[in-house]
Amino acid sequence: MATLMVDFIISLDGYGEGEGWPGFWGMEGPEYLRFLEDEPAHTALLGATTYRLMAGLADEMPDELAGMTAQPKVVFSSTLDEPLTWANTELVRGDPVEAVRAMKQDHPRPLHTVGSLSLTRALLGAGVVDRFRVVVFPVITGITGRNRVFDDYPDVALDLVESRTIDGRLQLLEYVPTVIDGPPG
């Protein structure tokens, strides 16, 4: 059975991007890029917005994102059309929760989301997420921040299973999530 990891890169104040900021807030150091390249073989799951962003970054930084370009990717979208421009990407138009449930049963590789706020909310709410990983970038995007990552999420208890510092400034935090009905007690 394949496992599903939700994967986010966020600013310290919880945004997934900032107006005018480059990808990775311009802070993608060599250790972080190596971390991305050295990830165990998995299939990346994306929504249309993240697909457009990452496909653009792959065009701008082909050497740095060669590993992501080579890996299999599944994008869930009703707005994209085939053929997709980013290599090794499959388009799924159906219900992402049902598609991921099926993938978890018979997919040969682990599954990781990349960004994709709406997709991850749906997957977490459906109880199909096994791990939740956040890489915190040391910026506060305040006025320019866009897409608060955790808005409209259910309440979730997180058990920390890994943490480390990357490039002397990025914080990687990995949790096992449990959706809860509200505050304990």
Image (spheres, helix red, strand yellow):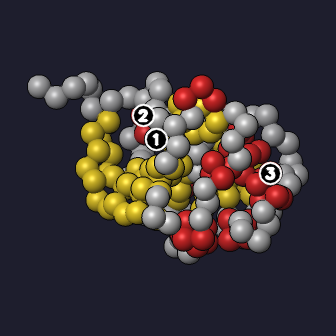
Q: Which of marks 2 and 1 is nearer the N terminus?
A: 1
Residue assigned mark 3: 56
Residue at x-position 32% and y-position 51%: 176
Question: Residue 76 placed where, x, y %?
Answer: 67, 43
Question: Which quarter of the picture shows residue 145?
Answer: top right
Q: In this view, does 75 lie above or below 17?
A: below
**Residue 136 image position (x, y, % from top left):** 47, 49
The structure residue drawn at horizontal position 66% and vertical position 53%, both measured from the top left corner, is 26
Q: Please tell me whether residue 62 is drawn above or below residue 6 in the rendered image.
A: below
Residue type at mark 3 is Gly
The N terminus - image quarter: bottom left
Observer-side mark, 3 or 1, equals 1
- Check disc 1 and report its element: helix, strand or loop: loop
Numbered circle sitting on residue 125: 2
Q: How far apart are marks 3 and 1 (CA)?
A: 24 Å
Q: Which residue lies furthest to the left in this view?
A: 185
Quadrant assignment, res 72: bottom right
- Closest to the camera, between mark 2 and mark 1, is 1
Image marks 2 and 3: residues in contact by CB distance under 8 Å: no
Residue 43 visible from this viewpoint: yes
172 to the left or right of 27: left
Real-space CA distance between mark 2 and mark 1, rounded to the nearest whole angstrom: 24 Å
Mark 2 or mark 3, earlier in chain: 3
- The residue tagged 1 is 12
Q: Do the residues labelled 3 and 1 touch (CB within 8 Å)?
A: no
How many residues crowd mark 3 within 10 Å: few (<14), some (14–19), many (20+)? some
- Residue 147 visible in this rendered orientation of the protein: no
Tell me if residue 92 comes above or below residue 166 in the rendering: above
User: Alpha-carbon distance for marks 2 and 3?
Assistant: 29 Å
Image quarter hosting the C terminus:
top left
